[in-house]
Image (cartoon, rainbow, N blue to C red):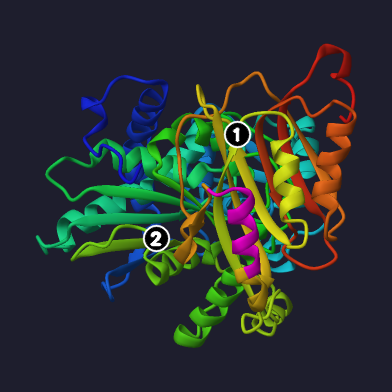
Amino acid sequence: MLTKNTAPLTSRHTTPSTNVATHLASLSASLSPLMRKYGINAEFSQPHHGLVVLDARRNKSSAYKLRGALASAYSAKQQGAGSVWTASAGNHGVGVAMAANLLGLSATVYVPMTAPDVKVSKIEQFGARVVKVGPNFDECLVAAQALQALDSQPSAFLHPFDDQIVAAGQGTLGIELFEHFTSTIHDPAVQAVRLFVPIGGGGLIAGMTSALRHRWSEKLPPLQIIGVVDESSPASLLGTLFGRPVEALPDTIADGTRVARVGQTFLSISPLVDFIMPVPHDEIVATMRNYYRSTNEILEPSGALALAGEALTRRHSLLPKTTSALHYAVLTGRNVDNQTFEAVLNEESRRCARSICRTAYQVRIPERDGELLRFLNAVSSFNIASLTYKQQSHSSHGELSVEFEVKNSDARPLHDQLMEAFPRSESLHNTRRLLLPVGEPVAQQYRDELVTLDDRPGSFRDYIQQLHNAGALGSVGFLFYRQPSQAGAKAQVVIGRALPPSLAGAFA
């Protein structure tokens, strides 16, 4: 699947995703005047080598999340709330604090203990009360939802991403992009428009996708939407493949996208997204560094995701070449502590590109017991960086998408050994494995579990061997493995398997 039908939603078959998207698009249209009233408009760069930078940071909060925060705070006030409270890794909290200040509401923002100082300081500057709770965002969110704002007047909880009004507020960016393209880009030679959007909890891409799919017509060039994620924070990738929120380990420097479970609001419209693109840690760091050196402006890690994805797509020709394709990349935030940013600028790559390479394969294996272990044993001498498997319906064979990180001198021996054991495997040249089409999720009856492993050679194989020896591997509907982004951290496995009732509690 390379493209989607880009006709307006009204001409499509009615599905849950189009129904939700139409509702979000309508909400975004009604909220757009509110954004303009408060001067919250995006800035668009001039096209340069086919790239337009959509900068959503140009407001006093320095982040796009002010849009969703203002939309939800305005709605809460309309319903009689005198105060609001929320949980945030930082930027949504800054947005809520600023929105509350503009609308005359009091606000309480719960942040994790690890929240960047620059974001906490901005929340307080806008007059909101800050409460630190929990070691990470997801625990902070649970704690905040169980509490009330520290105020006696009627209050409302404003979810940072899994809320349709929040998503619709972010979707006003899509309206502005549509207006920019139709009113500013006059070149009839443009044959495709591609939008790169970062995904954390999914509110931004849900809103933008809804607004754009609703407005885009067959008279315009085909539109492709690419959701970009840090491969070390794969909640959105897992959610789209599994069909529901699935817990993952968010081991990422991009605190703005550090969520363990993607929101249902995003999953409800995810079929309207064309691709999910996991980007390596080193690429995010390189993008932040390159952007600073070329513009002398700061990007926070999550703010650099879309630009990193666009650069990889262009560098490796991941999408079909056209004579004239226009790319939009959304910059989402610049709130990062100076010390953290300096560390990023000076950070060494996880691997030495001169001596170590990443090489990827699509491995075709029979759908029968023992084949996964046979594959792992066949490549036991080589380091697996990532592995993704999704069961195909009505097929006697399955496919493993596998990425290895090996010495340059080991690339040929790996290829020969793999082709000998699994001759129908395909080498994925030019990093094609980075662009994953969004399709039908695996069956819902599989139970998912998250397992963390030591970052050492063979730990993944040992885990699968343990399940196999105990007869607990069962029918695997989905399997996901990623080594950590930095040495010393934990590798993660997310597995969805149907277990016999007698073993349902084992290995939980």
Badge 1: few (under 14), some or many (20 or more) residues near its Cα, within 10 Å?
some
Can you say whether 451 is above or below 281 in the image? Answer: above
Residue 280 located within the stretch drawn in magenta: no
SS state under label 1: strand
Question: Residue shown at 83%/12% (left/top)?
Answer: 501
Tags 1 and 2 touching, CB below 8 Å:
no
Estimate the spatial distance between the alpha carbons at disc 1 and disc 2, rounded to whole Å: 28 Å
Q: To which quarter of the image does residue 468 belong?
A: top right
Residue 26, how many percent across, how many down?
A: 33, 32
Q: Which residue is mark 1?
A: 366
Which residue is at the far top?
501
Can you say whether 408 is above or below 266 in the image? Answer: below
Question: Residue shown at 67%/72% (left/top)?
Answer: 410
Question: Residue shown at 76%/41% (left/top)?
Answer: 373
Q: Which residue is mark 2?
A: 318
Amino acid at the residue labelled 2: Leu
Residue 414 located within the stretch drawn in magenta: yes
**Label 1 or label 2, whichever comes before in sequence order:** 2
Q: To which quarter of the image does residue 316 belong?
A: bottom left
Amino acid at the residue labelled 1: Pro
Q: Nearer the viewer, mark 1 or mark 2?
A: 1
Can you say whether 477 is above or below 92 in the image? Answer: above
Viewer-proximal residue among 310 and 79: 310
Q: Which residues are magenta?
A: 413-423
Residue 500, how many percent across, how many down?
A: 80, 15
